[in-house]
Image (cartoon, grey):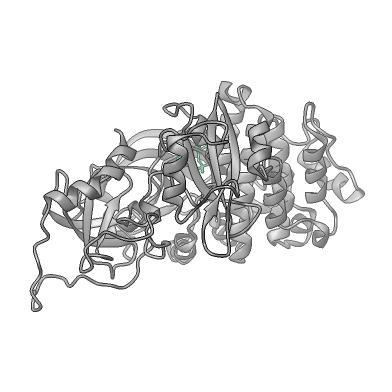
Amino acid sequence: MEIQKRLSSCWQSFLACFKKPRRSAGDPVRQAARNPGPGDNAEPAAGGKSSAPAETAGDYYIALYDYSARTEEDLSFHAGDILEALDKSPGEWWFAQAASGLSASKQGYIPANYVAPVESINAEPWYFPETKRQDAEKMLLAGGNQHGAFLIRNCESQKGELSLSVVDSGRVKHYKLKKMDNGQYFVSKTRCFQTLKELVEHYSRQSDGLCVRLGEPCKKMEAPQTHGLSYNTVDQWEIDRNSIKLLRKLGAGQFGEVFEGIWNETTAVAVKTLKPGTMDPEDFLREAQIMKRLRHAKLIQLYAVCTMEEPIYIITELMKNGSLLEYLQKDNGKTLRISDQIEMAAQVASGMAFLELQNYIHRDLAARNVLVGENNICKIADFGLARVFMKENESVYEAKEGTKFPVKWTAPEAINDNKFSIKSDVWSFGILLYEIMTFGQMPYPAMSNYQVVQKIPQGYRMTCPPNCPKVMYDIMIDCWKEDEQDRPTFETLQWKLEDFFDMDVTSYDDASRY
Ligand code: AMP
């Protein structure tokens, strides 16, 4: 579907075709709440002046993605449809009425992160604010985008600045968009624009010094994850076991089997079943409460649980390509370039930097606990579970040969003194880097767990894997510093890994030479 075209033309046709039924003062229907929602902190309309009728501004939203109703109370819509928010108080899910499109005049719940205020900059099809440079390249080079495809994003290296990324003959070039003190934007000082929209319009008509005339906005990839499965699983996330159908087994782990499933006959999910007796449901629920609050693009989202009977079900988002370990070891691993490997490592570091900020410890970071989706997207799984199991099942984690303790991934202070911290996670991250750079080889290949436990305190460290750039090996060695305080933070690891890609072009003139 041509999402972009529909997005840009939709508000205009909506204004022409749809007359808003005016709500009387005493309307008993849900009042149009005016508390701000996720998309409301947008800049003023990219066009500068809003042409939305004054009484509707703030209530009307444009859909950025398609959404298929998951429950009878949800509203289906297509990208480009106009929706009136009737009640934004539930937070991440709003009660809305479709003002255009196939569902016109129907009411129901919508995920708030799928819409943006009409005529706001967030509704512009070329505006991808939170997109990193490397993600912009990946998206622009993905199928469907042609010469001239472009997007505007926040610049990573300079806060508050914007970058324009554009496809030129199969390569992506990046320009800094500068802002003058009077608020005008420019790529080259010789031509300034009141708004980004005017800038885009100008360079869509002529290249005027850019490497290429701007063409179509970059195609939007996957829709974002919704907050929970539906509006009513956000707080009440113990769900009816009968609403889950198990479709096929995806794998088996230490604690049970994992299935692909479908919730409410509408929504694909992963279902982790826990072997009876593995843990106390109370303990698990306490931990799961925390896990549920930890939302980040690089962490697997916990959607819901079924704990009323055994086996306990843990319902999470489904990742198409399974675990990173399997992915690296299979054929697709062989097609990965070094830049892909580093980028995947950067994604894991980004998820861990978030956990670090939340003072949360993973305790079992390894390629087997990272899952891979489309386009090499990596997300960390099983954060927090290790702690629950550890309390209940201490012996499993004893540093003995032949037990299930992940000795080769665990920092020496954690093995010897049970001292787990974010810094022991950093150690494990170094081992995960080794797994990534060796396409899933077992760490310390010629050594037993016992030998590893003996030799690490004596200063032994793995050597640089074949074909691994020295800079990557240096990062591993930093992660394996004996004193945990000497190990880097995940924040540092994230920017170091991302820095391999971050070379935004500094000026218009430089860019045209690329
Ligand atoms: P685990 O019990 O977490 O070790 O999972 C066992 C296997 O199930 C993994 O190696 C993956 O192949 C698969 N798996 C686990 N969680 C998911 C998920 N959310 N999406 C897709 N596959 C998964």
Residue 345 location (% of width, % of height): 65, 42
Q: Looking at the picture, does residue 143 appear above or below residue 347?
A: above
> Quick check: 16 left or right of 258?
left
Q: Is residue 250 above or below residue 89?
A: above
Q: Is residue 410 visible?
A: no
Residue in front for this viewpoint, 219 or 198: 198
Q: Position of residue 148 (x, y in %)?
A: 48, 31
Task: Please report the residue visible at 62 percent of the width from the left and 54 percent of the height from the top.
Answer: 352
Residue 183: horizontal and vertical position, in percent?
A: 52, 62
Q: Residue at x 22, y 46 (%)?
A: 77
In the rendered view, does 89 fall on the left or right side of 313? Answer: left
Could you tell me which residue is drawn at 31 percent across and 73 percent down?
Answer: 35
Quarter of the image for residue 122 reads: bottom left
Quadrant location, the N terminus = top left
Q: Residue at x 43, y 54 (%)?
A: 302
Farthest residue in the bottom direction?
A: 26
Q: Nearer the viewer, residue 138 or 201?
A: 201
Q: Position of residue 193 (x, y in %)?
A: 48, 52
Q: Nearer the viewer, residue 237 or 349?
A: 349
Q: Is residue 364 left or right of residue 388?
A: right
